[in-house]
Image: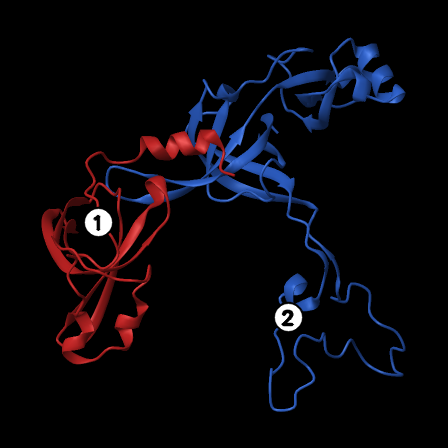
Chain colours: A blue, B red
Amino acid sequence: MKKIIVGNKVGMTQLIDKDGIVTPVTAVKVSYCSVIKLIDMEKQGYNAVLVGYDEKNENKCNKAEKGFFDKLKVSPVKYLTEARLDDLSGYAQKKEITVDTFEKNELVSVRSKSMGRGFAGTVKRHNFSCGPKTHGSKNYRRPGSIGGGTDPGRVFKGKKMPGRYGNEYVTIKNLQVLDIDNENRTIYLKGAVPGKRNTVVEIYKK
Amino acid sequence: MTDILIKELEKKQMKENVPEFNVGDTVEVSKIILEGKKKRVQKYEGVVTRKQGNLSRENFTVRKVIDGIGVEKTFLLHSPLITDIKVKRQGKVRRSKLYYLRNRIGAKASRIKAKT
């Protein structure tokens, strides 16, 4: 990984250019993203930074969190993520990561939690097809057969079945950075980003 | 619940001096069409059957009957390709979407009372 920043998804809109071409954009706003801790080759055996995002009220921290942040002498944050970086130069503890670490037209990866869909059936979760609605059919959104009979005597592992869907981390690769707004601390990405509004979004470059 | 940031961005992209027109009006839309490298302005006249969206996302659909075949074109109101919109006639309608025109045949297909 080369660089990383964490922000909140603001929402989507469209940009109209001079030739009348319309592109979908997602705005990601970075309130305050900083380096909490450096993890270096000598001590831990790999290079990484612990990135913190969004300031947290000290009164809302539990004792464990308070101890952790006090030990590092940094102000508490809401969201922590570790990013393995190739090169640690330019990074220091407490240093803020700003929007301009990224450039225009760069291709980046985006990782965030997708929308939670609760306990979903096979049609929504695994794109199974529906059965007929009418003609006496009792197989409209059912999963169908889940395997053989006596011969295997069991259901194979990994069989696609109903269950919890969404609310998990999804990575989208190669999203183009369309614009960077230093004043509003915002990055505009081409296309959609997983999750609903205000979801914490990690933008990084491999 | 749109964020102010996005609202501002959309407002910035809006064109000034966009004529006001409503559903049911007859309008003439001039649109730049690229043919290879040549630019040409195409005029398209018809009845506005719907208006959708807010700010820079606003779009409208114009319906016209050509040789007995109904044609509907949707335009982005704030697109730089749309050079001119002329309101030819104001219509009096009681619906926000004039989809009922699709089921009409013959002379009735484009008949809308004029606004008085």
Q: Name the residue carrying label 1.
A: B21
- Residue B2 sits above or below residue B50 on the image: above
- Residue density around tag 2, few if under 14, some if 14–19, many if 20 or more, within 10 Å: some
Q: Secondary structure at mark 2?
A: loop
Residue positioned 72% across, 74% down in the render: A143
Asked if B113 appears above or below A169 in the picture, the reply is: below
Q: Which labelled disc corresponds to residue A128? A: 2
Q: Write down the chain letter for disc 2.
A: A
> As drawn, is A84 to the left or to the right of B108?
right
The amino acid beneath tag 2 is Phe
The quarter holding residue B44 reads bottom left
Q: Residue at x 82, y 11 (%)?
A: A70
Which of the two residues, A137 or B116, is positioned nearer the viewer here?
Answer: B116
Residue at 58 percent of width and 39 percent of height:
A197
**Closest to the observer: A127 or B13?**
B13
Q: Nearer the viewer, residue A199 or A202?
A: A199
- The answer to whether residue A16 is left or right of residue B88 is right
Does label 2 lie on the same chain as label 1?
A: no
Quick one: B114 or B28, which is closer to the camera?
A: B114
Is residue A47 depicted above or below B77 in this figure?
Answer: above
Residue A63 seen in render: yes
Percent x, y of residue B95: 32, 62
> Is label 1 or label 2 in front?
1
Contact between marks 1 and 2 (CB within 8 A): the answer is no
Quick check: can you spot residue A205?
A: no
